[in-house]
Amino acid sequence: MRGWMGKFRSLFLFGALTLLLAGCGEENLSALKPKGYGAELLLDLMLISIAIMIFVFIIVMAIYAFVLVRYREKKGQEHTIPKQTEGNKALEVIWTVIPIILLLVLAIPTVQATFDLADKSTQGDEGVITIDVTANQYWWQFTYADQEIATSQELYIPTGERVYLNMKSSDVIHSFWLPSIAGKMDTNPGENMNTMYLEAYEEGVYWGHCAELCGPSHSLMDFRVIAVSQDEYDQWVEDMKNIDPEAAPETTTAQEGQQLFNDNCMSCHAIGGASAGVGPNLANFGNREKIAGILEPTKENLVDWIVHPDEIKPGNQMPTEIVSEEEASKIADYLLQLQHSDVGTDVPTQNEDE
Amino acid sequence: MSTALAQKRGLGAVIWDYLTTVDHKKIAHLYLVSGGLFFLIGGLEAMIIRIQLMKPDNDFISAGLYNEMITMHGTTMIFLAAMPLIFALMNAVVPLQIGARDVAFPFLNSLGFWLFLFGGLILNVSWFTGGAPDAGWTNYAPLSTTSPGHGVDYYVMGLQISGAGTLIGGINFLVTIVNMRAPGMTYMRMPLFTWSVFVTSTLILFAFPALTVGLFLMMFDRMFGSAFFDVGLGGNAIIWEHLFWIFGHPEVYILILPLFGAFSDIFSTFSKKRLFGYSAMVFATVLIGFLGFMVWAHHMFTVGMGPIANSIFAVATMAIAVPTGIKIFNWLFTMWGGQIKMTSAMLWSVAFIPSFTIGGMTGVMLAAAAADFQYHDTYFVVGHFHYVIVGGVVFGIFAALHYWWPKMFGKVLNEKLGKLAFWPFFIGFHLTFFIQHFLGLMGMPRRYWVFLDGQGLATGNMISTIGAFLMAIGTLIFLYNIIYTAVKEKKVGGDPWGGRSLEWSIPSPPPHYNFVQTPLVRGLDPLWIEKMDGKEGMTPAEPLGDIHMPNASILPFMISLGTFIAGFGFIYQVDDPTWLILVFVGMGITLGSMLTRSLKDDLGHHIHKEELEEDIKKGAGK
């Protein structure tokens, strides 16, 4: 008897855990707290499937519990032989047909959602934004083809609009995952370009991950999607289009930093306009939520990152110790004052509430 | 008999005996020991992974080493632990269940084992020669084709050799079951374990060639400069995914089906009832096997195949839930009205039902193609497949080992220790993997070396790690049980559980010719039928006569050793052509051994009637 009681106790525990956890999960990161069209559709689909599955599980466990309690061998029964039942056609038909019906109930919304999320009918229409996403080991490049805006790590979109993403990879397979807005899609190398769309309901900074194993720093290939109102978005586009990469910074250290940056870093990086493609475009760097997608945006971290990128993101392409710590500090001064647009800086990020 | 002789001749002779044996029961021991060792290695790797993920931003191991750990954990557990342990059960039981004296090709049986072992050794040598494979057990191109060092080369060589062994083993069991059944054992009288091994062997026959082809293409890409997967040179990286999953999806059914069979036998035996809905169970097994081939692309919903392909594969995948459901209900109704005896074997089997049901349900959830845009490559998937593979395959292996241990070794594993091992493992299993579903939905992708602080993932990961330690404790108790049983427990007779199928009609462990006289099978559960008619054992189908047995041979070992040596030559010839010497030496040994095998007549030997009569007096005829 203790055997099955124990099992029930643990099942109960896990049930309680389930309830506890349903309320958990970081806002703007969790698939359980949708903030956009795709994620909402997918959560609905999940809930349908979970409801069906829990129904099935309860039936199975009811029979299971009954059988294990009722038919345990009792003392003195050792030599009796139970009836050798061959089967029961009616019962077997029932537990074949009912699951088929249940699966049909699930299959229909599944197919609907699958086609819905693959819909590209409005792509290319007047005013509909398409952004090219290129995944690299271990950073994200976002190019607004019509606007000649290139940025990296942070993707700005307007709320309430469908924004299409044309996605590919420059090296290995990655996967663009934005749980709270739209789910995920792989980025493939070569000609297998994928398209998905995002539609954020509310303003916010949403956290995305790379979901396909892509090398040592796979777990550090994060990005942000910053959803702002249409007006703010237009402002951002305006700001980004008017970046002057040559603009001289105010302080002298930053000016020295600019020179050092131009001498050492420009072969890979760019600031605004078209991207060099080898390394991230550093437009608006001073307003980024994170350095390299993961570090707090402090000067100390930035210097560390410039001098020892391999210790922070193992296996990344940026050369180590190309400049001295002192030079890096000047470059950091320069980069941190690159604040081309203050749009989105006031959008609260969930992770800073903690 | 030969074991007894060998024991008298000391350790060297025992080793020689195992190196040359073609006896399926001893090959089962070899598979059990090597599969068990690899299971421990894979488990150790799992523990290292869980320690690394115990807390946010942990730096217990480096990023590169972590990727090697996850790759080797997956590869080891699937190819080097689960597969051989299943082959151990197949070898130990199937010929006995169908009333055969051996498998159809005893020489090939031994060859299959040695190829598997040497392939596994190649894979694990990589730890000591500059880095293990690190592109995930799925080894997706171009991450794998561009991975620096030789890690991925080891993956390619190791799995190629090991996979050849598995393919040989699968074909062997297919032929054995088709050809070697005792008189009266029609297909619809075969025990469910034999049935599921039959279907599994068919799956191996069709699935492994896809892996072989994929590995060859990757080998050419990495070692000889071809560009099948290099998009820069006109290749296509997605082809690897298709080839891998055309093999990889049936592979999960290759793993689980034999244990579905074992559970069927165990439920039936310990409920003292015949299996409920036998023909439906057979049909469901075949149907699962068939559908298993039709659904590989459900691993690729996010690759960008388009909504039509995604929908077709989604619905086809959901369909598998129907035959699996049939099985679950038939097991429940096998116990219904029976007398359930809660032995350790039964405990693992009973625990399997809710665990596997959860795994199956999350499987249906994953089949909903669009929803997979959230689940794919997250801890939800990690939770799901561990529920299936641990809750199904590992629970099944534990159950089957407890069940057939007396048949393999003549002693019942200690029941108290058996149950003591069960509880920490069972609780630890749910603690580890249940919470991972939620971690996945909360935004934790799989194969993450670190997760950052402040994302709400810390508590769940901590619980998961604690669970992993409990599972390790359970495993260690099981190991202790094996030693304890070997030292302290007493020998038991041929039929300790009140068995129903043929393996229980002969002594434990069986003589090396298995059956003195081939039994006559009169229906399903043949031994049960005889017992119900008041008989002690099976009615023989033939008069007592000489038995023809195959001779032992070192050649399978030599052939495999040759491939092992040549493997290193292939891996390192990229660096320096002198390494090609190893290719020539290794292939020389392999081909020379094959030539010897072809030219030398080996007609086997006979066990004479007089010897058998001696054995019967000692109780072998029972």
Image: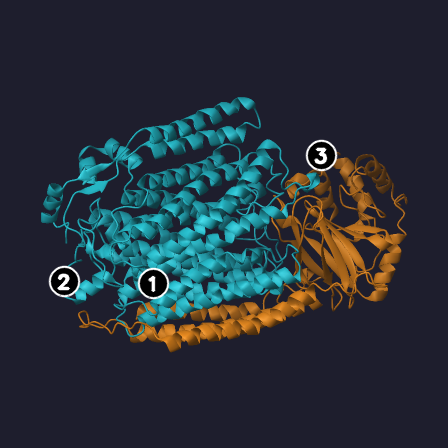
Q: Are marks 1 and 3 on the same chain?
A: no
Q: Is residue B597 above or below residue B528?
A: above
Residue beneath the point at 77% across and 40% down: A329
User: Would residue B423 be found to the left or right of residue B325 on screen?
Assistant: left
From the viewer's perspective, is the residue at label 2 or at label 1 nearer? 2
From the viewer's perspective, is the residue at label 3 or at label 2 nearer? 2
Gap between marks 3 and 2 measured at Cα: 85 Å
Ranked by sequence position, the earlier of labels 2 and 1 is: 1
Identify the subunit bearing mark 1.
Answer: B
Q: Which chain is orange?
A: A
From the viewer's perspective, is the residue at label 1 or at label 3 nearer? 1
User: Would residue A133 be found to the left or right of residue B227 on screen?
Assistant: right
Per the image, the residue denoted by label 2 is B535
The type of residue carrying mark 2 is: Lys
Q: Nearer the viewer, residue A193 or A352?
A: A193
Per the image, the residue denoted by label 3 is A321
- Point out residue A207 in the picture as x, y percentages from the top left corner: 68, 58
Per the image, the residue denoted by label 1 is B264
Secondary structure of the residue carrying numbered label 3: loop
Circle 3 packing at 10 Å, graded few (<14), some (14-19), many (20+), is some
Residue B30 lies in quadrant: top left
Identify the subunit bearing mark 3.
Answer: A
What color does chain B have in the rendering?
cyan
Circles 1, 3 touching at the beta carbon (< 8 Å): no
The colour scheme used here is by chain
